[in-house]
Image (cartoon, helix red, strand yellow):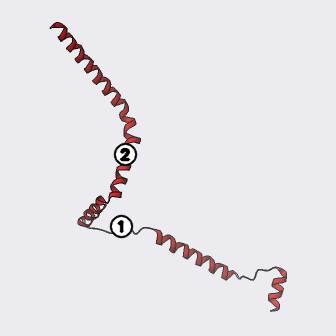
Amino acid sequence: MVQDEIATDEGINSFSTGSIVAAAVAAGVAAYLIRRSRRSEPPSVETPVQVAAQAWERAQDADFRRRTAEATRDWVIERVLPELKPILLDLLKGVKDIADQGFKRAEKTIKDL
């Protein structure tokens, strides 16, 4: 009792080093267990039949198909279209030139009648 009063008067902390270390270890263990429980389970070795069955179930899910279609559309818009734009413009110019030649031939043929 006398030591407790002296410790309180002198401002010495009444917590021992052991209790602080024990609390830190307990907090670390709790954090590790929480982190481990949130991690997904490692994939187990499956047979081809199981893989195919899971893929079929995912394919039947309407939400999965919608997300897949959205991801594909986004990828095409972001990656493919910018690269295809010059090609499509050149192709359109070529179609225009061929159509103009065809109209000129048709016009000439009509005049020659």
Which quadrant would residue 13 be assigned to in this image? bottom right
Which residue appears at 36% of the width and 67% of the height?
43
Farthest residue to the top: give it.
Answer: 112
x then y, percent, for residue 66: 35, 53
Farthest residue to the bottom: give it.
Answer: 1
Q: Are marks 1 and 2 in contact (CB under 8 Å)?
A: no
**Disc 2 residue crowd, few under 14, some 14–19, many 20+, Cα 10 Å:** few
- Residue that mark 2 sits on: 73
Q: How far apart are the alpha carbons under marks 1 and 2?
A: 29 Å
Q: Which structural element holds mark 2?
A: helix
Q: Which structural element holds mark 1?
A: loop
Q: Residue type at mark 1: give it.
A: Pro
Q: Which mark is residue 43?
A: 1
Which residue appears at 29% of the width and 58% of the height?
59
x then y, percent, for residue 69: 34, 50
The image shows a total of numbered marks equal to: 2
Quadrant occupied by the N terminus: bottom right
Which quadrant would residue 50 be assigned to in this image? bottom left
Vertically, is 38 above or below 18?
A: above
Q: Earlier in the sequence, mark 1 or mark 2?
A: 1
Which quadrant would residue 58 be assigned to in this image? bottom left
Which residue appears at 42% of the width and 67% of the height?
40
**Disc 1 residue crowd, few under 14, some 14–19, many 20+, Cα 10 Å:** few
Quadrant occupied by the C terminus: top left
Q: Residue type at mark 2: give it.
A: Arg
Vertically, is 72 above or below 87?
A: below
x then y, percent, for residue 78: 41, 41
